[in-house]
Image: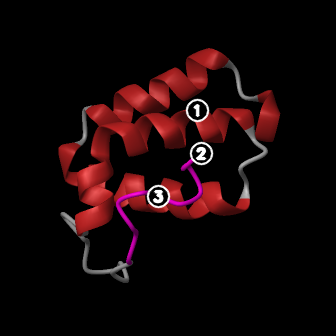
Amino acid sequence: AGNYVKDDVWHALIVTISNAPYLQGYCVRSLYKVFQTYSDQESLVQVAVWCIGEYAEMLVNNVKVLEMEEPMTVSACLSTLCL
């Protein structure tokens, strides 16, 4: 839906992520990867930035990596977000 996602939908996604601790690491890594490609989609940016803010430690330290995931290296600065 891109930029046409209603506020209540992305708010619900944030609630879902915050209530699923076993998926938080996967979500933050997935959103970080997608954010690098689709940073022009406002709703995606809102969810990704919130998730990175909440779970940056999981992103930087590869916490709770699922078996299907490839470990990734992310600097503590998160270069695409540094100003």
> Which sits earlier in the primary sequence, circle 1 or circle 3?
1
Residue under numbered circle 1? 46
Amino acid type indicated by mark 3: Leu
Residue 2: image quadrant is top right
> Which sits earlier in the primary sequence, circle 3 or circle 2?
3
Amino acid type indicated by mark 2: Leu
- Along the line of sight, which residue is nearer the eye, 65 or 19? 65
Q: How far apart, in angstroms, are the residues tagged by discs 3 and 2? A: 10 Å
Give the mark toward the camera: 3 or 2.
2
Residue under numbered circle 3? 78
Q: Is 79 one of the magenta-colored residues?
A: yes
Q: Assign the C terminus to one quadrant of the image.
A: top right
SS under mark 3: loop
Q: Which residue is drawn at 58% across and 16% down?
A: 8
SS under mark 2: loop
Amino acid type indicated by mark 1: Gln
Which disc, if any, is residue 62? none
Residue under numbered circle 2? 83
Describe residue 21's horizontal placement relative to residue 76 as left or right: left
